[in-house]
Image (spheres, rainbow, N blue to C red):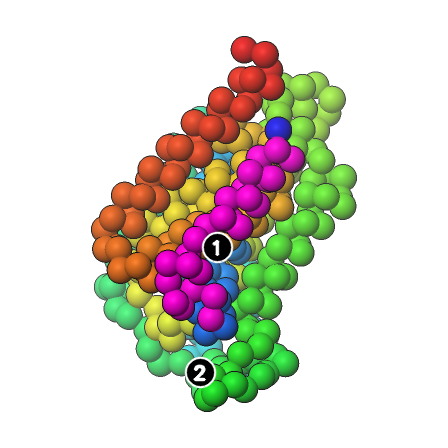
Amino acid sequence: MNITHNKILLATIMLMSIGLSLFTTDFLTIENLYDVVNNYAMLMILACGLFVVLLSGGIDISFPAMTIISQYVMISLISQYDLGFFAVFIISSAVGIVLGFINAFFVNKLNVPSIIITISTLNIFYGALLYITKGVWLYDYPEFYQQEIIFFRISNDNFDYGLSFQALIAFIAVLLTWILTSKLSIGRKIYALGGNKEASLRVGFNIFRLQLLAYGFMGLMSGLAGVVQSYTVQSVAPDSLLGYELTVLAAVVLGGASLSGGRGTLSGTIMGVVLLAIIQNGLNLMGVSSYWQTVITGLIIILSISLTALGQRRHQGV
């Protein structure tokens, strides 16, 4: 089913790309494609994290708050102390992982649906951040964090492009996710946990450890996403990602990941992000209101979940 789903996704991406190239003049330009890659790098990173959580049979709604907190703490520290560029990743990732572990602890110990836990921690994290920071935005970046980073730079008609910092971090996130889910035995255990928790318990899997890994990985991706977003927009707003969880969920579900756990592919998740990026970019190029874009995103979630559920029922012979 996943292979068929991926083929449908690929065909849809190709058809939409052809359509947008015919109906808009900017879609296939190097400037537009380069901007799309940079602007949707954070979505790709967070989708990788949510993909792993969904595989484990859980769901995490709190990652927008984890992303904001990670980058807020990181920017606050590097602005006050001369910590260097690598400290950016260490601080932001560490904060995200700790917050992810908190989610895993409550999901495991309270034994209630993870969506309830993470909706609760979303509000707790956001509320604590707003209370502590008073909603103050951060603009005071160290000089090294304000410089544009492009590897293999190419200049063309006063436009520079190449391997951007955002794209590189997104690639690293995808690589880490691929290693975890495809090359490590613990990744197969995460698939098994999401497929059948009771069977995983019977064969002796350490459920708490697997949940720590899944939600901790989501925290790591939130930390990396915080680095990318703060670098891209050159500011940190405590409420900037409110509602973004639906966009990420839409991308992962579009990719064929099951909300019940144990099913999904990384390649599908990547194509889900690409498809959503094409849809939103195409709507922007055609001048569609951002409010309607939100409506369309919601409709996409419903349609994708319905098609995925229908495919699973047919696969099970129901």
Q: Quadrant of the N terminus?
A: top right
52 w.r.t. 25: above or below: above
Q: Residue furthest top?
A: 318
Q: How many C-alpha atoms fall within 10 Å of the one at disc 1: few (<14), some, or many (≥20)?
A: few
In this rendering, would 276 be left or right of 170?
left
143 w.r.t. 179: above or below: below
242 or 90: nearer the eye? 242
* Mark closer to the chain start, 2 or 1: 1
Is 204 colored magenta in this rendering? no
Q: Quadrant of residue 226?
A: bottom left
Residue 166 x/y as whole percent: 52, 68
Q: Quadrant of residue 27?
A: bottom left
Q: Are marks 2 and 1 in contact (CB under 8 Å)?
A: no
Q: Secondary structure at mark 1?
A: helix
Q: Look at label 1 and name its amino acid.
A: Ile
61 or 288: nearer the eye? 288
Q: Which residues are magenta?
A: 2-29
Residue 18 is tagged as 1
Seen at 24% across and 64% down, the residue is 134
Residue 253 x/y as whole percent: 48, 38
Q: Nearer the viewer, mark 2 or mark 1?
A: 1
Seen at 60% across and 15% down, the residue is 316
The residue pinned by badge 2 equals 146
